[in-house]
Image: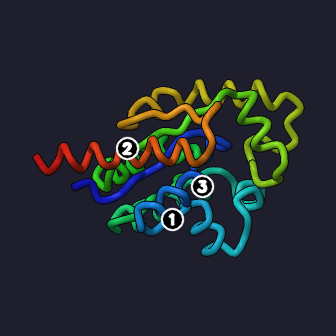
Amino acid sequence: MKKNIILTGFMGTGKTLIGNIVADKLNMEFIDTDKVIEEREKDRIARIFQVKGEEYFRKLEEKVINEICKKENCVIATGGGAIIREKNYNNMKKSGIIICLEAEPSIILLRTSTTEDRPLLLKNKDAISTIRYLINSRKKYYDKADYKIDTTSLSPEQAGEKIIEIWKKENEKNRN
């Protein structure tokens, strides 16, 4: 039996919203690694990036992922760049099934344009190019996920159902 469902993928693909839905339906704990970091640092991710830098943030993220991946029966939403670090990927892989959520860059821009919490997009005049660039630079890491789901034209509930189907199929496979 797989212990956890780990959601990865670019910002704006629905990891937090869909993760909450899945956790609720499967009676699992939902953990958002970015929220854990914000609570511990008593600051927002965007401000941590701005004041202390990306490397500082990535080290915090690595520590949090290491801790959380030791838990069981959780749906874990990771930050969009978490999977880039090999240590994070290895911890995630040992912890459960990794599902990468994807979406079209134009949809990602639409979904993220209403918030100030996107440090890699803030103050960016050409956000769509930045989104495309970051997705392409992370593609080889996102491709390491066990499954991919394109959320572009799915409701959060539909995407959640797809994750639950994968979860059930994986656990059935492991029972046999």
What is the number of the mark on residue 31? 1
Q: Nearer the viewer, residue 43 or 174?
A: 174
Picture quarter containing residue 113? top right
Badge 3 density bin: few <14, some 14–19, many ≥20, Cα 10 Å: many
Quarter of the picture containing the N terminus is: bottom left
Q: Residues within 10 Å of mark 1 (few under 14, many from 20)?
A: some
Q: Amino acid at mark 3?
A: Thr
Taking 92 as reference, is 130 above or below it? above
Image point 66% across, 27% down: which residue?
Answer: 104
Comparing 125 with 157, the one in front is 157
**Would you identify the image quadrant in which residue 124 lies?**
top right
- Residue that badge 2 annotates: 165
Secondary structure under badge 3?
A: helix
Q: Residue at x 67, y 25 (%)?
A: 133
Residue type pointed to by label 2: Glu
* Distance between mark 1 and mark 3 Cα atoms: 9 Å
**Residue at numbered disc 3:** 16
Identify the residue at the far left of this view.
Answer: 176
Q: Position of residue 99 (x, y in %)?
A: 43, 42
51 relative position to 97: left or right: right
At which x and y percent is residue 23?
Answer: 47, 62
User: Which x, y percent locates residue 150?
Assistant: 55, 31
Q: Disc 1 on helix, strand or loop?
A: strand
Residue 94 in the image: state x and y as whole percent.
28, 52
Q: Tag 1: residue type? A: Ile
Determine whether, in the image, residue 70 is placed left or right of residue 77.
left
Q: Is residue 140 left or right of residue 122?
A: left
The residue at the point 64 percent across, 31 percent down is 153
Mark 2 element type: helix
